[in-house]
Image (tube, rainbow, N blue to C red):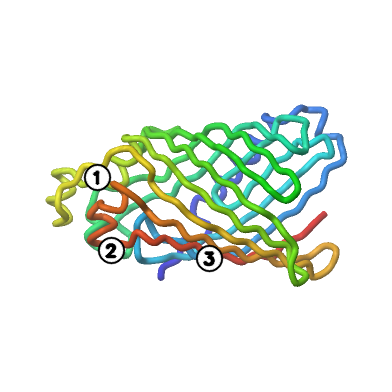
Amino acid sequence: MKSSLFKNVPLLLATLVCFSIISLPASLLASEVDISMGAGVAVVPDYEGSEDYEAVPLLMLNAKWEQGYYVKFMGNRLRVNVVPDNTWSVGPVLQYRGKRSGSVSNNKVGDMKKIDATFEVGAFGGFNAEGWDASLQWVTDTSNEHDGALTTLDGGYAFPAAGLKNRVGISMTYADKDYMDTYFSVGRKDAGRSGLDRYKADSGLKDIGINFSSSYAINEDWGVTGLFKYAALLNDAKDSPVVDDEGSDSQFTFGVMATYKF
């Protein structure tokens, strides 16, 4: 396992902060707000479809106003609710996607053309009521790295148990042709560099997954949160030589972080 802790984090955080401020009404900056922050570490595949894992920073920031507006940043995704409602939410999304380079653990995949890190931007809509939540999100590439778009549907249920606050959820993601071609196709040059068979990936349902998180309150301010996610790659993503020959269609994420409420 290799680690790339804190790489690209300053740029990511600066972008997220600016994006959050300009998306909210200026009057909220003087309003009362509940804020919680978290920091820890997560273990994730070192590229999508990999069977090797790396450690990355796990950061969280939640700010919620009584009117229903909120800013939620977790891991690689920022959502801002611009609707003054505590049940329904609509707003912009900013999402970070890491690079796939020659430094990945698999030598054949590492010999393929480098895919740089990128930001994806879009919108989401969702609801949260009596422990149940669901959302539909759409994002597209901002830096011409994959030029694609992804649509994600997710939902879950939050419940207390054994002194813990828990949530279990499911999700599925549809990826368009440009995204699939960038991350799962093997072109002529990549086949020559890596020795993998040539392959053309098309659009479709990319993955389906389950996730679970659990939080323990140490006192009124401090707490600990753990999370787990499993995603199964499907269709052309699963059948790609990048996954089928050299990686795994089973993708796991584990994380733990300390949290603080202001």
> Closer to the N terminus: mark 1 or mark 3?
1
Residue at 21%, 47% in the rendered image: 186
Report which quarter residue 218 is drawn in.
bottom right
The quadrant of the picture occupied by the N terminus is bottom left
Circle 1: residue type: Ser
Residue 211 lies in quadrant: bottom right
Please provide percent x and percent y for residue 17. 65, 40
Q: Earlier in the sequence, mark 1 or mark 2?
A: 2
Give the amino acid at mark 2.
Answer: Asn
How far, Cα to Cα, is label 1 from label 3? 28 Å
Mark 3 surroundings: few (<14), some (14-19) or many (≥20) residues within 10 A: some
When the figure is inspected, residue 4 is found, relative to residue 82, above or below; the finding is: below
Earlier sequence position, callout 3 versus callout 2: 2
Q: Tell me the residue at 65%/60% (across/down).
A: 39
Res. 185 mark: 1
Which mark is on residue 254?
Answer: 3
Task: Return the residue nearer the eye: 188 or 235.
Answer: 235
On the picture, is 148 further left or further right than 262? left
User: How far apart are labels 3 and 2 at the CA level?
Assistant: 21 Å
Disc 2 designates what residue? Answer: 106
Percent x, y for residue 157?
A: 66, 53
